[in-house]
Amino acid sequence: QSALTQPASVSGSPGQSITISCTGTSSDVGAYDSVSWHQQHPGKAPKLMIFDVNYRPSGVSTRFSGSKSGNTASLTISGLQAEDEADYYCSSYSRDSTLWVFGGGTKVTVL
Amino acid sequence: QVQLVESGGGVVQPGRSLRLSCAASGFTFRYFGMHWVRQAPGKGLQWVAVISFDGRKTHYADSVKGRFTISRDNSESTVFLGVNSLRLEDTAVYYCAKGDVAGPLDDWGQGTLVTVSS
């Protein structure tokens, strides 16, 4: 069982917006603004899409945005495109001895 | 651009050991922390370990503490993961990622597959 809870799957039509939730605890998501989101296409390495809750690395589309409220973080993908179909993982720095925790991943399907 | 290339994976029997390597280029290696993250077949990502930029601080996931050792050679721009007493459940693709202890993990290698099998 993963430390952070994500929905197993989310789907949307091209052009729509979708939101993926990531629920942790007061020891991780709720304790730090160190939530990241990674995109992973099949057979590929993860790619950082959002860090520190709502910052985008250079080169990442502005269609990707992040937010946090209490122990739950969210990733929103606006203007959904076929290339966005992938697995998405949230992660957070933690007060616990296991310093970094990941969510179980969410499969995004573009209908 | 940042490049991280893992090596050292393979098929190994339970109880045996391996040393994984990650060669870095495209950035000043000695200024950044480095992580290892693994992914079992068909499963999600699991953080394994991190080492600070100077090698003085290391942290491990509870599930590997005492069996895995992270280290680095800044003169060779390489980070290592020593994996001992391997178990079937250690079978995974092992990724190295650039990032300070408090993150984020901002660049990842392509991974090296470790298969533990008798």
Image: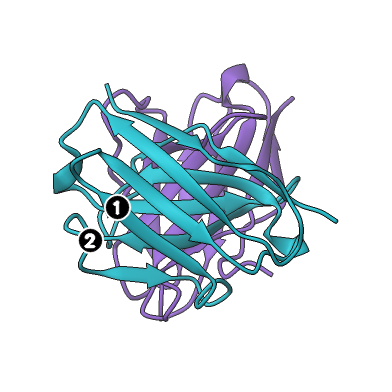
Q: Secondary structure at mark 1?
A: strand
Which residue is disc 2 drawn over? B55
Label annotation for residue B96: none
Q: Amino acid at mark 1?
A: Arg
Q: Amino acid at mark 2?
A: Gly
Q: Hey, which quadrant is residue A94 in on the image?
A: bottom left
Q: Is residue B101 visible?
A: yes
Question: What is the total number of numbered labels drawn onto the structure image?
Answer: 2
Q: Chain of mark 1?
A: B
The chain in purple: A
Q: Residue at x 48, y 59 (%)?
A: B82
Percent of width and height locating residue B28: 15, 36
Q: Secondary structure at mark 2?
A: loop
Q: Are there few (<14), some (14-19), or many (20+) residues within 10 Å of tag 2?
A: some
Horizontal side of residue A99 vs A84, given as left or right? left
Q: Colour of chain B?
A: cyan
